[in-house]
Structures are given as C-alpha cells and as structure tokens.
Amino acid sequence: MTTIKIRGGQRLVGSVQVSGAKNAVLPIIAASLLAEKGITIIEGAPYLTDIENLAHVVRSLGVKVEMSPAGRVQIIAENLATTEAPYELVRKMRASFWVAGPLLARTGHFRVPLPGGCNIGERPVDQHIKGFEALGAEVSIEHGYVEGHVNGRLKGTTVYLDIVSVGATINTMMAATLAEGQTIIENAAKEPEIVDLANYLNAMGASVRGAGTDVIRIEGVESLHGATHTVIPDRIEAGTFMVAAAITGGNVFVEGAIYNHLSSLCAKLREAGVDVEDDISGIRVRADKPLKPIDVKTLPYPGFPTDLQAPVLALMSRVNGVSIITETLYENRFMHVSELRRMGAEVKIEGRSAIVEGVPKLTGASVTATDLRAGAALVLAGLVAEGETIVNGIEHIDRGYNDLVGKLRTLGAHIFRTDDYVPPLKLVSSQS
Ligand code: UD1
C-alpha cells in the first residue's frame, strides 16, 4: 500500500508552480460533449485521477479523449454512442453527474447514476434536477439512475437555485447553451471555475453573460463546436501551498496563484500575522513571527472556501490560542480532526464548529486521509510534526493534487512516497 512519509521540521523556502485547476478542467471536459463538430483542446490540465476518471466516463459515451504529458487534453465528441453513463465509473466521482446537462441539451436524453453521498456529506443533486425541469425536461429517478427526456430542444427560462451550488449552476448553464431562447440563472454560484467554464462555452459558440455574478444569462444557440482553452490556475492547490508556507514558518512564492481568487484566504492569513504579498505572477507568503489564532467560517465564493478548511484547521492546531473554524457547506467535513488529534492536536467539535486550542508541538504518527482536503491537512501537519508521519489513504490526495510530494520536496520538505510515482508517464499511458 502506497503511503506518504514525512519527517517534520523543515521550513519551506523557494518557489512552487501552481497547476491548472482541477475544478475548471472537470466541467470543461463535460461541456465538450456539447460540441457536435470540431476538437476541444484543454491546455494546462494537471495529471489527476479525478480527471482520468471523468475522461473514462466520456469515453464510455463514445467520445475520443487523449491526454498528453504536457497537460493537453484533446476531445472529439462528434459521435456519441450512448446517452447512458455506467455506474461503475460514475460512482467514483460526483463530478461525473455533469455529463447530464450536456447530454440532455444535445440529444434530448440522459441516464446517469444518482451520485451517492460521500465522506464529507450527503451531497444531493436536487438543484441540478430543478434546473433541468425548469428548462422543460422530464426527470425521474429509478433503479438508482436519474433519467431526463425532452422532446425537441430545451426551452429557455428563469431558474432560481434554492442553494448556491457550483454543480447545479454548471449543469444548468451547460444545458441552457443549446436551449431555445434566453435562460436566466438566479442565485448562481460565482466561483472562478464557473467563469472559466463560461469562457470556454463562449469560445464554443455559446452566449453566456454574467458568470462570476449571481445572475447568469444564457442566450441559447442551435449548435456548438470544439474550442481551445487554457484553464485557470488551481486556487485550492495554491492555497494549500500558502498554508504550507505559513505552518512551517517559511517563505514561499506560489507562482501562478491569482490573488483575487484567494482574497478570503489572504485576509485570514494576514489576520493570523502572516505576510502575504500580491505579485503580478503569483503570491508570496512569509511567516517569520509567531502567529495568532483566527476564526474562519466557510461560505460560497467569494467567502472562505470549504476546500481550504482542513488545511487551515491544521495550521491553527499549532497556533497558540483558541481558533474557531465553522463549516457551513458540508455536514461531515471534520474527519481530519480525529487524525490530527492522533498527532497531538487539541480540537473539540461542537455542531458545525471546531474549537481548536493551539498546541506547541505535534508529533508524527500513522494517519489516514478520508478525503482529498483532509489528506492535504494531514500532510501539512506532518511537515511540522516531530518525528515521522505516515499518511495512508493517499489515493484521495492523488485525486486533486498534482505531484504534491514532489512540489513540497522542491521547497525543502523531507517527504516521499513509498511508490515510484511519476505523473507525466501516467498521462501518456492513459491515452486511448
Ligand atoms: C464543488 C467542488 C468542491 C467544493 C464545492 C463547494 C468541483 C468538482 N467540486 O462541488 O470541491 O467543495 O463545490 O465549493 O468543482 N447541494 C444541494 N443540492 C444540489 C447541489 C448541492 O443541496 O443539487 C448542496 C451540497 O450538498 C453542499 C452545497 O450545496 O452542501 C454546495 O455544493 P456544490 O456547490 O454543489 O458543490 P459541488 O459542485 O458538488
């Protein structure tokens, strides 16, 4: 079983390059299904198992997907063989449900397994379904599958999403690109990845305005074509390196990080006493004095990202004083706490809040990642723990961090994987 081993105590220093955003690449791969003609080329895609999994899902629909070591994904979706996605692939990843919107818009039908809950919470898709129904589709859930039909084209409409949902905004937006007339999505999510998707859709010939605000307007068109698009940098990966710099008292330039995408994290790190400098080509993080405790509440963008809650909790576990970290998006996203406790952290959970009493030292232990960001938090804790930390369950980390271990090593961390993982070679072998 592959693990990550860390010998804590090294201050991180140097420069690290951020990869392309996983959460931008995934919806763009799904949206490429909308292209009746032409080739989609995504530049800057990181090697991640989540991306490989979604590539398998779209291949199962008859689409050609090739990935190159340089991070280029090429997709030809002219011929769709089926509108039904297989359970054994979809169950691995919720983002697979994003193929539903494009299939419905282009063919009038989809049958996609209902994604289950996951380690961090229940994660329903009722708002995705609300979007499809508002656009005129009939949607049913039977035998574990969600099935949608429409005779002819979807019809543009106004949809108010009851919950600010990234996934439902994306699925509704993609479906509406080929609908007849105008669609207005109200209470839309505003994440940078949604803006990136809108830019890609517009390059395909769609007409999407307002992405990045809570009202998105889509003027339906009759057909879309492939397009070339370079994805934005991964703000969560960037944020993880920023927190890594802070927890080790380091001085790190996070190259490619976009300040505006990370303003809530920057504000919180500054409040804690970290020096954060915005630079044209990235963000510098310097932590050379003792830090102060902070209170953090996760919220939809531009609020503090839930995906950085676990890393920041790990940081606060070492900061003298009491920090309160409140998770408002997911009901079960404190699984990292019991593992951090095994390393000596003092954290109490009260409802949706973690009360973190900073300790002067963590000690290395064998711990297990239960989800992607929990895994990152354990690695960060390992960087400052006394002695050796062994992180198990690293398949979760491989879902969303491109060579996390290699990048941390270039910054001076004593960290290695117990397999001989070389990401670019895996990319080559994933071609089909
Ligand atoms: C995306 C991100 C994930 C991030 C999350 C919130 C990707 C691949 N994943 O996930 O990393 O943690 O945004 O920033 O981009 N909800 C409903 N009904 C729905 C849809 C969502 O109740 O139909 C709820 C969810 O259970 C959750 C909240 O809304 O409590 C936000 O979920 P959503 O924004 O949809 O997250 P995802 O798109 O799944």
Image: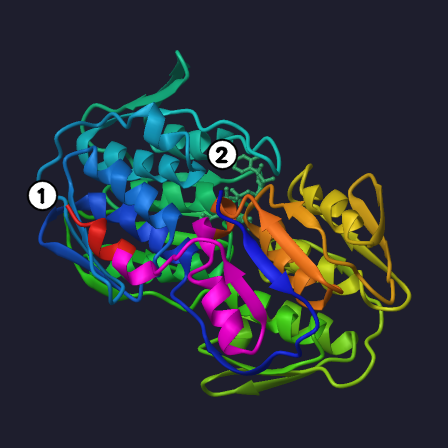
Tell me if I can see residue 221 in this picture.
yes
Which quadrant would residue 330 be assigned to in this image? top right
User: Mark 1 sits on what residue?
Assistant: 78
Q: Amino acid at mark 2?
A: Gln
In the rendered structure, the answer to whether residue 191 lies left or right of residue 174 reads right
Q: Position of residue 377 (x, y in %)?
A: 65, 56
* Vertical position of residue 314 compared to residue 154: above or below: below
Q: Which residue is nearer to you in this view: 310 or 158?
A: 310
User: Mark 2 sits on what residue?
Assistant: 127
**In the image, which disc is placed on residue 276?**
none
Q: Residue at x 39, y 28 (%)?
A: 133
Task: Find out whether residue 211 is within the magenta segment.
Answer: no
Q: Position of residue 157 (x, y in %)?
A: 37, 39
Name, please, the residue furthest toward the right: 321
Quadrant placement of the C terminus:
top left
Q: Residue at x 72, y 46 (%)?
A: 339
Question: Is disc 2's CB within 8 Å of ligand 1?
Answer: yes
In the rendered structure, the answer to whether residue 27 lies left or right of residue 386 reads left
Q: Which residue is nearer to you in this view: 180 or 332?
A: 332
